[in-house]
Image (cartoon, rainbow, N blue to C red):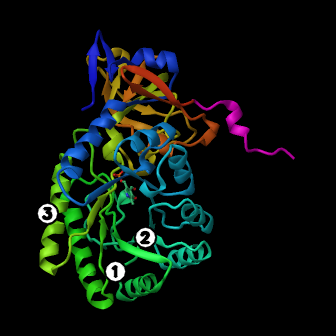
C-alpha cells in the first residue's frame, strides 16, 4: 500500500501533489503518510494480536522516532522499543506509559540504566554480564526489582540479509553467546539476585529478512537453551522476544512476503517446541520497525548540477544524499526513484544520481534509467521511512531536512528543517 498516483505527469503521494509539497516545504523533504503507518499497525493487530493469545508488539523506534511518531505509537496498542537514553527521552516526552517501554542497547551506560530504572521502564533487555551487575547495583540502591529479558545470540550460520544488518550470527557484538559458561554465569547471577527478575529471553536475527526460516531456526535453538535452563536452574521462560527485521519492498529484487508469513511461522514454531519440551507457552513478543514505517515515506529532492561525461556517464546531483540517507553508503541499499514532475515521461537517459556531500561514496543511484533530467526537477525516492531520518547527520554541516506527515489529506510539519543557528547551538567559542 504505497498510495501513489500519477496525474497530469505529476506524482501524488498520499493524495498530495509532491511537486507542490517540494515547493511549499522545500527539499530535501521526508514525507510520511500516516495512513500507511496505521494500515501496518492494523495488519499487525489482525495477524498477530487479535489472532493469537499471549502476544505483544513493541515498535522498534530506531527506525523512525520523533514526538509525533511516539504519539502515534502510543495511541495504538503497541509498546515501544528504545535503544538509548535519547530514544527513551523522546518516548517519555511523547507520553508513553513507561511500562510499555522496552530498553535495548549493547553497551548501556550507568547513566542510561539509571535513567531507565528511575523512569520504571517495563523491561530492560540485558546484553551482557557487566550490564546485569550494573542493573543489580542501581536497582538495589533504588530498592526496586527490575524486570529483564536476556538477549542471546542464536549463533546462526545463515542469515539471508546484508552482513551489515545481520545480528544473530556467532561473530556478533549483540547478546550473550551460547557458550555454556557464559549462559550459566548470566542466569545464575540474575536468578540469585533479589533485585532482578528474569522474565525471559530475547534475540534478533537481523533486518530486512525475507525468509521466515531464519527466525524459525533461531526459535528452535532458543528452545534448546530454554530446556537446558529449566533443568539446570528450574528457570521458567515467561516471555520470548523474537525481535523484528521483517522485510519490506524497496525494489523489485525484494521478494516481500505478507507479515503473516513470519508471524504464523513464529507462533507455530513456538507451539511445536512447547509440546516437544513440555513447557508452558511464553508470551511471544515481536519488535518490528521497518515494517511499520519503511514504506510509509518518500524523500523529495531537487536536481541541481547535471553533467555528461562523454563515453563515461551522466551525473545528476541532488540537494541531499548521504546526510539524509546513509543506508546507501552503509550497506548499498537500493530504492525505486521517479521524477515527480515528469512522472509519465518515457525513461530516456541513464544517470548516476549523487548527493551534495564531499565524499565520492555519496552516490544514491548508479546508472538508473530516467526521463531526461534538468536543473530544478524533483526526484522522489520511495520506501525511505525507516533508518533515513533516524540516521541523518550533519556531515559538511549540511542541515537536516524537514519531515512532514500527511494526516487526513493535509500535510503537517512534524520536524522542522534545521537552521544555520542549530549548527552552533552547542559550540562554545573561547
Ligand atoms: C533488537 C532489535 N529489534 C528490532 C529491530 C527492528 O528491525 P527492523 O526495523 O528491521 O524491523 C532491530 C533493528 O536493528 C533491533 O536491533
Left-right relation of 52 to 170: left
Disc 1 or disc 2, which is closer to the eye? Answer: 2
Q: Is residue 255 visible?
A: no
Q: Which residues are magenta?
A: 417-430
Report the residue marked by disc 2.
Answer: 148
Task: Give whichever of discs 3 and 1 has the lower sequence position.
Answer: 1
Disc 3 or disc 1, which is closer to the eye? Answer: 3
Which of the two residues, 205 or 130, is positioned nearer the viewer here?
130
Report the residue marked by disc 3.
Answer: 268
Report the residue marked by disc 1.
Answer: 178
Q: Is residue 427 magenta?
A: yes
Q: Position of residue 49 (x, y in %)?
A: 24, 51
Real-space CA distance between mark 2 and mark 3, rounded to the nearest whole angstrom: 25 Å
Task: Give whichever of discs 1 and 2 has the lower sequence position.
Answer: 2
Task: State the residue at coordinates (36%, 31%).
Answer: 34
Which of the two residues, 153 or 303, is positioned nearer the viewer here?
153
Residue 267 picture quarter:
bottom left
Amino acid at each position: 500500500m504505497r498510495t501513489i498516483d500519477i496525474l497530469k505527469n505529476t506524482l501524488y503521494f498520499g493524495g498530495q501533489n509532491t511537486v507542490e509539497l517540494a515547493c511549499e516545504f522545500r527539499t530535501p523533504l521526508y514525507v510520511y503518510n500516516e495512513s500507511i503507518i496505521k494500515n501496518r499497525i492494523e495488519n499487525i493487530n489482525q495477524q498477530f494480536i487479535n489472532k493469537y493469545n499471549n502476544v505483544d508488539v513493541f515498535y522498534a523506534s530506531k527506525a523512525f522516532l520523533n514526538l509525533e511518531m511516539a504519539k502515534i505509537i502510543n495511541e495504538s496498542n503497541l509498546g515501544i522499543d528504545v535503544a538509548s537514553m535519547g530514544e527513551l527521552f523522546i518516548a517519555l516526552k511523547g507520553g508513553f506509559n513507561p511500562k510499555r517501554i522496552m530498553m535495548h542497547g549493547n553497551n548501556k551506560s550507568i547513566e542510561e540504566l539509571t535513567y531507565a530504572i528511575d523512569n520504571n521502564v517495563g523491561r530492560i533487555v540485558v546484553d551482557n554480564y557487566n550490564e546485569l551487575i550494573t542493573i543489580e547495583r542501581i536497582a538495589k540502591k533504588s530498592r526496586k526489582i527490575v524486570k529483564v529479558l536476556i538477549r542471546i545470540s542464536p549463533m546462526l550460520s545463515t542469515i539471508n540479509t546484508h552482513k551489515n544488518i545481520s545480528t544473530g550470527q556467532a561473530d556478533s557484538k549483540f547478546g550473550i553467546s551460547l557458550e555454556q559458561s557464559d549462559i550459566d554465569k548470566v542466569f545464575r547471577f540474575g536468578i540469585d539476585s533479589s533485585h532482578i527478575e528474569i522474565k525471559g529471553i530475547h534475540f534478533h536475527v537481523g533486518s530486512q529478512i525475507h525468509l521466515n526460516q531464519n527466525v524459525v531456526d533461531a526459535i528452535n535453538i532458543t528452545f534448546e537453551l530454554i530446556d537446558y535452563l529449566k533443568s539446570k536452574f528450574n528457570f521458567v521462560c515467561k516471555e520470548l522476544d523474537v525481535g523484528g527485521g521483517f522485510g519490506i519492498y524497496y525494489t523489485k529484487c525484494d521478494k516481500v512476503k505478507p507479515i503473516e508469513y513470519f508471524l504464523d511461522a513464529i507462533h507455530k514454531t513456538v507451539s511445536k517446541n512447547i509440546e516437544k519440551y513440555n513447557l508452558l507457552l511464553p508470551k511471544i513478543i515481536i519488535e518490528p520497525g521497518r515494517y511499520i514505517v519503511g514504506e510509509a515515506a518518500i524523500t523529495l529532492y531537487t536536481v541541481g548540477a547535471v553533467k555528461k561525461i562523454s563515453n563515461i556517464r551522466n551525473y545528476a546531483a541532488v540537494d541531499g544524499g548521504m546526510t539524509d540517507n546513509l543506508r546507501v553508503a552503509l550497506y548499498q541499499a537500493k530504492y525505486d526513484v521517479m521524477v515527480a514532475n515528469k512522472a509519465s515521461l518515457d525513461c530516456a537517459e541513464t544517470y548516476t544520481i549523487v548527493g551534495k556531500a564531499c565524499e565520492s561514496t555519496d552516490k544514491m543511484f548508479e546508472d538508473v534509467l530516467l526521463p531526461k533530467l534538468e536543473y530544478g526537477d524533483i526526484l522522489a525516492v520511495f520506501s525511505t521511512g525507516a533508518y533515513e531520518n533516524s540516521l541523518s547527520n550533519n556531515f559538511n554541516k549540511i542541515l537536516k531536512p524537514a519531515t512532514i506527515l500527511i494526516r487526513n489529506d493535509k500535510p503537517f510539519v512534524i520536524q522542522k528543517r534545521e537552521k544555520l543557528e542549530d549548527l552552533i547551538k552547542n559550540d562554545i567559542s573561547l
